[in-house]
Image (spheres, grey):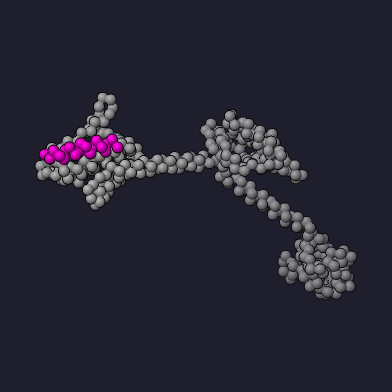
């Protein structure tokens, strides 16, 4: 009990136990100064309400003698003589529990939000393999809605030839074991198969008993497809590199000249011919190269505008890479030979390149030189024979 114009007049044993101050320490002092009271409203407003309405109730925060803060539910009644009877009940423990429960609820709500918004399928099931929860990610990954999936056996998404996996998984879960990044195949509602990476953990109740399992399934179908494509491309790149190096080695072994500079030029020309045809492969994604394109590319330096010294003709023929490389180098060598020793070394010399398919499916390629020295034609025959045999 305290008076509006004076200090505390009465301080019972309950107040002593709650705050730690004896009656002798409290009586005569102002309560809010003694207890360092934190009011929910301004103190003057509280007094005004007491005067007007004769009562006030609310929560107060007090500091005990030992420095602890306590929260009390306070009910105050103003008597006619200006005395206030104040009854305080300690609710600190209850408030702490409420705060902990509120924080826990917020955590659960955040967790639920994370689970629902996850791109991964997050599913829970009991020890009989019956689905008990199914998030939005599971709907996207497997095609079943939560209403369709919950209550069904998890085997609904397991292909028939992998049903044994579920029995093995449940055995491990019952033993309390966790399964990390288990890669397997699962089946969508539409029947299509997907590759998934599974992480499965036991779920325990409040007593610590295993009652089910939580499963995170990540669709890695595209990732696996990309990995397979990368592996295929790597093998193809290795094969092409080895093939290209073999061709270069063969050209070097085949190349002959009377002087080092001539040998160097010969090798450079052949390598350039390979580079030219490889640029054509890129355009077709390494399917091959069209014969007429190869021919025009190699004979372009000798086909000036307005001149008819070089004639090219034949049906469309797509050569696979190995054949295209051999033809490109052969045409390069024949053209170089013609410019040095054959028809193109003479002002009126001409070259005609024709090709056709034979009845047995073979390609017949004909290189004809006219108006040039006989020795040039003989060299061309020998050169073509040697290159194509290589």
Q: Which residue is drawn at 38% across and 43% down?
A: 241
- Give the magenta part as a residue range: 371-390
**Overall secondary structure of the magenta section:** helix
Quick one: quadrant of the N terminus?
bottom right
Number of marks drawn: 0
Residue 318 lies, in percent from the top left, at 29, 35
Image height of 13 relative to 357, above or below: below
Q: Name which quarter of the figure residue 246 lies in.
A: top left
Location of the C terminus by quadrant is top left
Which residue is at 82% across, 60% downward? 89
Q: Can residue 4 be seen in this view?
A: no
* 191 relative position to 294: left or right: right
Q: What is the x, y in percent for residue 74?
A: 80, 62
The residue shown at (69%, 51%) is 105
Q: Quadrant of residue 347?
A: top left
**In front: 80, or 100?**
100
In the picture as drawn, the residue positioned furthest to the left comes out as: 348
Q: Would you identify the image quadrant in which residue 143 lies?
A: top right
Q: Looking at the picture, how far across and down is residue 118, in whole percent?
A: 58, 46
Q: Is 252 displayed left or right of 5 in the figure?
A: left
Q: Is 39 a magenta residue?
A: no
Name the residue rendered at 69%, 54% in the picture: 103
| Position of residue 212 measured from the top left corner of the image (x, y, whole percent) | 69, 39
């Amino acid at each position: 009990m305290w008076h509006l114009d004076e200090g505390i007049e009465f301080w019972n044993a309950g107040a002593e136990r709650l705050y730690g101050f004896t009656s002798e320490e409290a009586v005569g002092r102002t309560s809010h100064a003694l207890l360092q009271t934190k009011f929910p409203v301004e103190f003057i407003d509280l007094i005004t309400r007491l005067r007007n309405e004769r009562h006030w109730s609310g929560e107060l925060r007090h500091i005990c003698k030992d420095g602890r803060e306590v929260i009390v539910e306070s009910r105050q009644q103003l008597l006619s003589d200006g005395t206030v009877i104040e009854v305080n009940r300690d609710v600190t423990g209850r408030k702490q529990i409420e705060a902990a429960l509120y924080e826990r609820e917020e955590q659960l709500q955040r967790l639920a939000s994370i689970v629902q918004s996850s791109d991964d399928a997050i599913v829970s099931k009991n020890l009989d393999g019956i689905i008990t929860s199914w998030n939005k990610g599971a709907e996207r990954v497997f095609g079943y809605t939560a209403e369709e999936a919950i209550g069904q056996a998890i085997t609904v998404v397991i292909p028939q030839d992998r049903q044994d996996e579920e029995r093995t998984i449940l055995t491990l879960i019952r033993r309390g074991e966790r399964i990390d990044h288990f890669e397997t195949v699962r089946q969508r509602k539409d029947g299509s198969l997907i590759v998934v990476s599974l992480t499965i953990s036991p779920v325990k109740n409040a007593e610590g008993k295993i009652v089910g399992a939580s499963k995170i399934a990540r669709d890695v179908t595209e990732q696996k497809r990309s990995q397979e494509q990368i592996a295929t491309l790597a093998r193809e790149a290795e094969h092409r590199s080895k093939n290209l190096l073999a061709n270069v080695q063969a050209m070097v072994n085949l190349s002959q000249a009377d002087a080092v500079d001539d040998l160097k030029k010969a090798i450079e020309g052949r390598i350039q011919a390979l580079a030219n045809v490889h640029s054509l492969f890129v355009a077709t994604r390494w399917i091959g190269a069209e014969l007429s394109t190869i021919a025009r590319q190699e004979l372009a330096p000798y086909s000036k505008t307005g001149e008819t010294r070089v004639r090219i003709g034949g049906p469309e023929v797509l050569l696979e890479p190995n054949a295209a490389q051999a033809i490109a180098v052969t045409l390069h060598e024949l053209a170089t030979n013609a410019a040095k020793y054959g028809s193109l070394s003479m002002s009126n010399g001409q070259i005609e390149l024709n090709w056709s398919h034979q009845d047995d499916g073979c390609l017949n390629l004909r290189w004809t030189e006219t108006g040039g020295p006989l020795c040039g034609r003989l060299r061309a025959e020998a050169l073509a024979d040697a290159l194509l045999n290589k």
